[in-house]
Amino acid sequence: DYVVVKMIPDNRLPPRHLHSVHTGKTFAVIKWESPYDSPDQDMLYAVAVKDLVRKIDKIYKVKTRNSTVEYTIKKLEPGGKYHVIVQLGNMSKESSMKINTVPLSAPDALKIITENDHILLFWKSLALKESNFNESRGYEIHMFDSLMNITAYLGNTTENFFKVSNLKIGHNYSFSVQARCLYSGQMCGEPATLLYDELGTGEDSSASKTRRSTDVAAIVVPVLFLLLVTLGIGFVVLYMRHRRLQNSFTAFANSHYSSRLGSAIFSSGDDLGDEDDEAPMITGFSDDVPMVIA
């Protein structure tokens, strides 16, 4: 035995399982289910979006017969905070949730250039990768002194660089650059942070490494150049000596060349010694003996 029971739809129930599916910089995708399964007619929902930062409200209407409803809320602001309320059009019980949109990205390529009595912060324009960012909004710069454990707001600028002066010797600093905060500092961009090690050298760690590598290169390159020049001169000297020895040997060989035999004739030391022993020693000439030269 069995009994079929059909529940009477109650339009005073709230939407079920309201949650966020995806949140971007300027939109949010939300999803919920109808108050009861398998609606037999179109249901009208009211989606109220309350901007918690700017204190303004917007209401959107959604009409559907689906049991599961997915809706995209558009025209939101990056880094905003919103309270979303979904209920039937007859002002029944409501379901609510909070949404925080994704803030603007951090500026790229933040770097420090050290000058004599100050430093310069440089970064790429955020408008190159963020279509929702206008340069007129500008950037704000913060500094954290780790020795004093103090965070200071240095100011804002619409340029892509910022000058920082009056840094203390022996202090370590962290600088952050982000899209300027709106509405009393409640809607900000992601910060780009860079450490700066100030130990009397006026350089950060990256700048110090770059400077060291530059100094090493300035020493190594001239030494290598002088070494190459010395080796070149040595090769030239050796080549000249080799040529001189070769020419001397050639001249010596030509002087002992016999055209009759077709070869060069060299006497050994022994032969020279024997000839010297056998040859009579010439002691001199008498004045009264005539010398005849044939």
Image: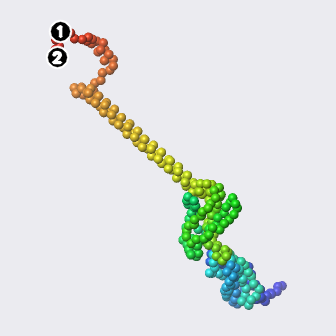
Numbered badge on residue 90: none
Where residue 230 sits, quadrant-wise, is top left
Position of residue 253 relative to residue 108, above or below, is above
Give residue 202's position: percent from left, percent from top.
59, 56
Q: Quadrant of the N terminus?
A: bottom right
| Kind of residue sitting beneath label 2 | Ile
> Which of 169/1 is in front?
169
For image coordinates 56% across by 65% down, the residue present is 122
Q: Classify 10 Å Cα crowding around label 1: few (below 14), some (14-19), many (20 and above).
A: few
- Asked whether, in this view, residue 2 is left or right of residue 289, the answer is right
> Which of 63/79 is in front?
79
For image coordinates 63% across by 64% down, the residue present is 175
Foreground mark, 1 or 2?
1
Where residue 88 sits, quadrant-wise, is bottom right
Q: Can residue 177 be seen in this view?
A: yes
| Kind of residue sitting beneath label 1 | Asp
- Asked whether, in this view, residue 67 is left or right of residue 283, the answer is right
Q: Are marks 1 and 2 in contact (CB under 8 Å)?
A: no
Element under label 2? loop
Give residue 26's position: percent from left, percent from top.
62, 77
Q: Which colour scheme is used?
A: rainbow
Q: Can residue 20 be seen in this view?
A: no
Q: Earlier in the sequence, mark 1 or mark 2?
A: 1
- Asked whether, in this view, residue 183 is left or right of residue 294, the answer is right
Position of residue 279 relative to residue 108, above or below, is above
Q: In which quarter of the image is the C terminus?
A: top left
Give residue 97's position: percent from left, percent from top.
72, 79
Spatial separation of the CA atoms under disc 1 and disc 2: 16 Å
Element under label 1? loop
Label 1 sits on residue: 288
Numbered badge on residue 293: 2
